Amino acid sequence: MRIARILTFCLLFLAILPVMAAQATSVQSASPLSVEIVSPNLIDGVPGLEQKIQARIMNSSDHSIQDVMGYITMANLTRHMTVNLEDYNADKPVTIGKLEPRESKVIDLPIRLVYTGRYHLYVTVVSSEMPNIASSIAIPVTITSNSKLDIRAVTIVSVVVPSVLLLVSAGAFMITKWRPKSKAYPAKEI
């Protein structure tokens, strides 16, 4: 009985061992870099809005980190896709350079919001010295259309313009239909 328990334990351990090894190889170490968006905490506007995103980049390690850069990442929540930031003039990262141990720097990242929709905007930081990246918590971005129409003007135009066109067309038809026709000259008899 005791030998059966030991054999069962060994078989279970051998069955779980590959799973534990796979998990150990997929675990990544945390990045010593971190980033937080300082301002704004949300964006609500119309297309064409130009905004500066302020982000604080921090080095929490005990050694300096070279070649640090930060950039904007955006996800379109309506279309479930990332955004091509070239359209938003935000495709170039801001180069920070070297961050000393426990040092932080605030950077400004410009963006021009051009399309309507709901987005999440992140700031991401990376260094060429390490494969790890760090991203901020997202801020919500809502861009709505900028049409501010006067409902009375729209109603007047939508009723008056077709009515005038109808009257002009009817008048032109009446003029051509009921205009006196010229009499043809009778043929001469020879």
Image: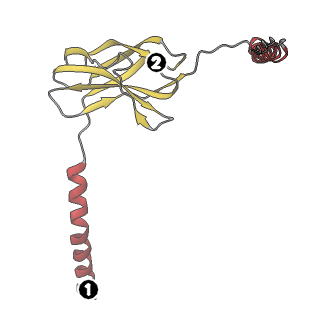
Residue for point 23% across, 34% down: 132
Q: Residues within 10 Å of mark 1 (few under 14, many from 20)?
A: few
Amino acid at dot 2: Val
* Residue type, numbered disc 1: Ala
- For label 1, the residue is 4
Q: Name the secondary structure under disc 1.
A: helix
Quadrant containing the C terminus is: top right
| 12, 28: nearer the viewer | 28
Between discs 1 and 2, the one toward the N terminus: 1
Out of 113 and 170, give the one closest to the viewer: 170
Query: From what the image shows, is residue 128 above or below residue 148?
Result: below
Q: Please tell me in which quadrant of the rendered image residue 102 appears.
A: top left
Q: Nearer the viewer, residue 143 or 98?
A: 143
Q: Is residue 63 left or right of residue 73?
A: left
Outermost residue on the front side: it is 190
Q: Are marks 1 and 2 in contact (CB under 8 Å)?
A: no
Residue 135 vs residue 171: left or right? left
Callout 2 environment at 10 Å: few (<14), some (14 to 19), or many (20+)?
some
Q: Quadrant of residue 11?
A: bottom left
Secondary structure under the numbered disc 2 in the rendered image: loop
**Which of the two discs, 1 and 2, sits closer to the camera?**
2
- Residue 120 spot, x, y in % from top left: 46, 29
Q: Which is nearer the eye, 140 or 114?
A: 114
The N terminus sits in image quarter: bottom left
Counting labels gives 2
Identify which residue is drawn at 25% across, 47% down: 27
Report how far apart the C-alphas of labels 1 and 2 lie in the structure.
Answer: 69 Å
Residue 149 falls left or right of residue 166:
left
Disc 2 designates what residue? 114
Please, which residue is most extreme toward the bottom here?
A: 1
